[in-house]
Image: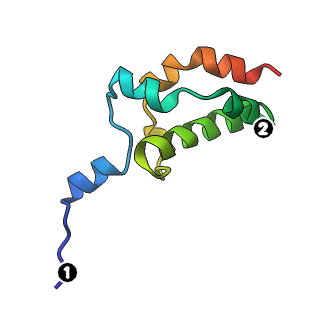
Amino acid sequence: MARGILTDAERLAWERFPADPDPDAIGIYFTLADGEIDTLRRLPTPGARLSTAVAVAAIRWLGFIPGRSTRRPQRALRGSRASSTAIQRT
């Protein structure tokens, strides 16, 4: 009989962003390079730009894009408002 390595609670914790991420982690994973910002500016809507930026950060940090995007770290999004403003300008 197959047996799981992780408990359900451990698996759920690995499937999403931490609830209260470390500020250093936010700086490392949510800081966009100039080329990435240029690419995001080409997307048609602010929502598309934001969701793509969060997806890029998720791949860097978690190695995949979580299925429940409502679980994104709010501190990271608050801290990136200046960046999102820069992305919206064309």
**Position above or below: 49 against 6:** above
Residue that numbered label 1 is attached to: 2
Specify the amino acid type for callout 1.
Ala
Q: Earlier in the sequence, mark 1 or mark 2?
A: 1
Please tell me which residue is depicted at 41% across the width and 46% down the height of the picture.
Answer: 62
> Residue 51: horizontal and vertical position, in percent?
62, 39
Q: Nearer the viewer, residue 56 or 16?
A: 56
The quarter of the displayed image where residue 4 is located: bottom left
Q: Dividing the picture into quarters, in which one does residue 28 lie?
A: top left
Give the position of the C terminus as an image quadrant.
top right
Q: How is the image coloured?
A: rainbow
Q: Which residue is mark 2?
A: 43
Asked if residue 69 is positioned above or below residue 7 in the image, the reply reads above
**Residue 81 occupies quadrant:** top right
Assess whether mark 2 and mark 1 are in contact (beta carbons under 8 angstroms). Answer: no
Q: CA distance from mark 1 to mark 2?
A: 45 Å
The correct choice, above or below, for 16 with respect to 23 in the image is below
The three-letter amino acid code for the residue at tag 2 is Leu
Of residues 22 and 19, the one drawn nearer to the viewer in this rendering: 22
